[in-house]
Image (tube, coloured by chain):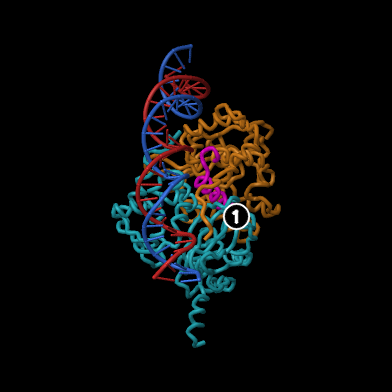
Chain colours: A orange, B cyan, C red, D blue
DNA sequence: AATCCGACTTGATCGAGATCAATCGAAACG
DNA sequence: CGTTTCGATTGATCTCGATCAAGTCGGATT
């Protein structure tokens, strides 16, 4: 009990109510009693390591997953070994929502670095949400948010050029780090240039060149995976001046 | 009561249990009693006409909408008058799910042709789903399906070229028409070339040229908005041979 | 019937970003 | 500690689809 190692292992198994993510995670806004009930169905396994899968495309859908620490990427593999990266997931973010419908996963999820993950058996969660309106409401909200995010990603891919896409990506990470109490200016990328390019519909070389260019323009400092954003304002203006006169439709 | 006009008007206000869409719409799978309870909160207004809005970006979120007849497009307007088309919605499809989270719509919805629409006040629906587990389950399924669809759209935009995108679009329409009891081979497009291009991240001219090319190749017959798909198999193979060696990531 | 207007088509040209190729450099490993 | 490997960078070239520029066609208006 007084052994340091044991204590640090137990930290991983911390309950929701004591978890620093409680304000932006699934149990957000539940009253203490409801949070305890939810807490009881959540499984907290030992940490996963770089390259481990939470699930693979085609696996039976059993659980939703929440990143507690570390990061995860989700991607849709294609027959020929290629893949489309669908998202990068930071602490507090829910993974697997797209699997509810056909009861099997239609994407894979792989951890990008040593990560602690909470597992939530969906059948229990659904059961619980019948008798817990606030949890049901929270589920609707989170599902809806996922849709909104995918839609803005569709707009990014449909309307924005390479430069705007990368700037938007960096700003998204920045904002999410900030909300989690990390620096919005200074962080490490847990994904490769390849994965960033894949996610943004760009070639690796393009991503690499853009990092170089952004650095030359004084927007950021980059060294391998270490990123320092020097001018958020200007980075935002890179995204804003998007699609100014492309693909417009006259209102009919 | 015996007046033809009244009867035909009442047809629009047909209850879920008598609606031909019942097998692929929100009430799908509910038992008769539950279906009646749901039915009672659904509003069926008079038909809307081409160009009418169901809602606009920024509107307070009150209702979900279901297309009963006709078709609707959803799109995200941008300051400068441009827009990103997010989807085209056919009978039985639910609209507005992305608005639950922040209680206001973050896209607009406009009917493409004279359409009958069912309105479902969300607060009532949520209330109802507390005491109706099957409805809650159905909502989870539909929200999850929307996420899956957006994700495959992301893959389409991220990995597929113009030809593959248009083929995929036509096949998607074809399949959805088929499920609704319409011909999967012969249909009319309710959206313009502009809107198709916008949706697929392509210029109008590209869409137009592709229709011409597909016709030359004997894949389809096109005349204005009238489309006849002559070879679904081959059209599928156009989509399949996608992203064969682009943006692949070696499994690490 | 004339004309007007917007949707669509077709052709010519251009450019952003993909692809190809070479090199570098850091981490991993025997 | 040298060697291997894989990610990242940089340069050169090519290509798909955007853009620019005319036309064409059909439906609506008068």
A47 or A244, nearer to the observer: A244
Residue B63 appears at what percent x and percent y?
60, 64
Question: Is residue A245 visible in this depiction of the protein?
Answer: yes
Residue A212 appears at what percent x and percent y?
54, 29
Q: Is the magenta stretch mostly helix, strand or loop?
A: helix
Residue B134 appears at what percent x and percent y?
54, 64
**In this rendering, is residue B243 above or below A8?**
below
Residue A192 in magenta stretch: no
- In the displayed image of the protein, which residue is found farthest to the bottom? B2
Protein chain holding label 1? B
**Residue range (magenta):** A141-164
Question: Is residue A126 visible in this depiction of the protein?
Answer: no
Residue in the picture at 66% in, 40% down: A180
Residue in the picture at 30% in, 56% down: B231
Give the position of the N terminus of chain A as an image quadrant: top right
Residue in the picture at 65% in, 50% down: A27
Residue A153 in magenta stretch: yes
B214 or B64, nearer to the observer: B214
Q: Name the residue under label 1.
A: B106
Quadrant in which residue A243 is drawn: top right
**In this rendering, is residue B139 above or below B200?**
below
Left or right of residue B226, residue B24 in this image: right
Helix, strand or loop at label 1? It is loop
B238 or A87, nearer to the observer: B238
- In the displayed image of the protein, which residue is found farthest to the right? A32
């Amino acid at each position: 009990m007084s052994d340091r190692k044991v204590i640090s292992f137990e930290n991983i198994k911390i309950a929701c109510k004591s978890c620093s993510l409680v304000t932006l995670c699934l149990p957000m806004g539940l009253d203490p009693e409801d949070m305890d009930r939810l807490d009881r169905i959540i499984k907290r396994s030992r940490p996963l390591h770089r390259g481990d899968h939470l699930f693979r495309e085609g696996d039976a859908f059993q659980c939703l997953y929440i990143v507690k620490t570390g990061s995860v990427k989700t991607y849709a593999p294609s027959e020929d070994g290629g893949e489309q990266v669908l998202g990068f997931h930071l602490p507090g973010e829910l993974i697997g929502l797209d699997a509810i419908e056909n009861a099997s996963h239609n994407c894979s999820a792989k951890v990008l670095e040593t990560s602690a993950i909470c597992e939530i058996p969906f059948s229990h969660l659904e059961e619980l949400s019948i008798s817990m309106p606030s949890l049901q409401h929270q589920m609707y909200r989170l599902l809806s948010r996922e849709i909104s995010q995918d839609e803005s990603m569709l707009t990014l891919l449909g309307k924005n050029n390479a430069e705007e896409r990368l700037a938007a990506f960096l700003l998204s990470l920045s904002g999410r780090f900030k909300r989690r109490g990390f620096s919005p200016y200074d962080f490490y990328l847990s994904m490769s240039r390849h994965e960033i390019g894949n996610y943004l519909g760009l070639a690796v070389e393009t991503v690499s060149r853009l990092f170089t260019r952004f650095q030359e323009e004084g927007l950021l400092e980059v060294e391998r995976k270490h990123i320092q954003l020097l001018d958020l304002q200007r980075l935002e203006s890179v995204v804003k001046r998007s699609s100014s006169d492309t693909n417009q439709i006259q209102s009919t």
